[in-house]
Image: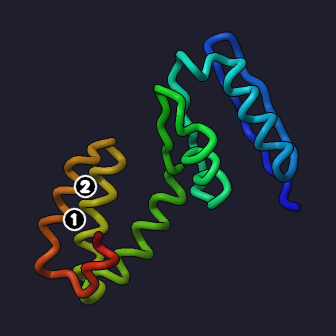
Amino acid sequence: MELRTARVATAQGYRYLSGTGETFLRQLYLLILLCGGMTALVTLLADGARWIRAFFNQQLAHLPFKEFILDWYHLRKKCYQLTSMICRGRKAKARLLGSLLLSLWRGDVDAALARLESYRPEAKNEAKLD
C-alpha cells in the first residue's frame, strides 16, 4: 500500500490528508466536497500518477468547476521523453523542446499546441505527437 498525501487549500486555510487505498480517496473526496467542491473551482496539481488521474476522471467527474494541472517537473519530463520519440535527431529535439517549454512556462497552451501541430510534417512518430 502506497502512502498518499493531499493538501486541500481554500481561502480560509488548508488541511493535509494522508492515507492509503480507497479509504484515503473517499476521505479526500469528502474533504473536497466539504471545502466547497460543488460551487468552487477544484484544482488538482499533481505528478500525473494513474491513481490521481483516475480519481479526477471518475470521482470528480460531476463537479462543475475542476481542472487538473501536471506539475512543472513532471510536465517537463514528459515533454522531454515524448520529443525524443517525435524528433529526428538532437538538434531538432532541442529546437522543438525549447519553444514548447517556453510556451508552457508562460501558460500559453494554445501556442504549445500550435507549435506541435506545425511540427507534424517533420515528426518521425505521429502517434506520439498526437
Identified by mark 2, the residue type is: Ala
Q: Secondary structure at mark 1?
A: helix
Compared across the picture, whether 6 is left or right of 104 comes to right
- 72 or 43, nearer to the observer: 43
Give residue 116's mark: 1
- Across and down, in percent, residue 128 comes to 34, 77
121 to 113, vertically: above or below: below
- Decide: marks 2, 1 in contact (CB < 8 A)? yes
Q: Quadrant of residue 45?
A: top right
Image quadrant containing the C terminus: bottom left
Identified by mark 1, the residue type is: Leu
- Across and down, in percent, residue 121 comes to 11, 79
85 to 117, vertically: above or below: below
Image quadrant containing the N terminus: bottom right
Residue at 86% x, 44% y is: 23
Q: Secondary structure at mark 2?
A: helix
- 18 or 27, nearer to the observer: 27
Give residue 112's mark: 2
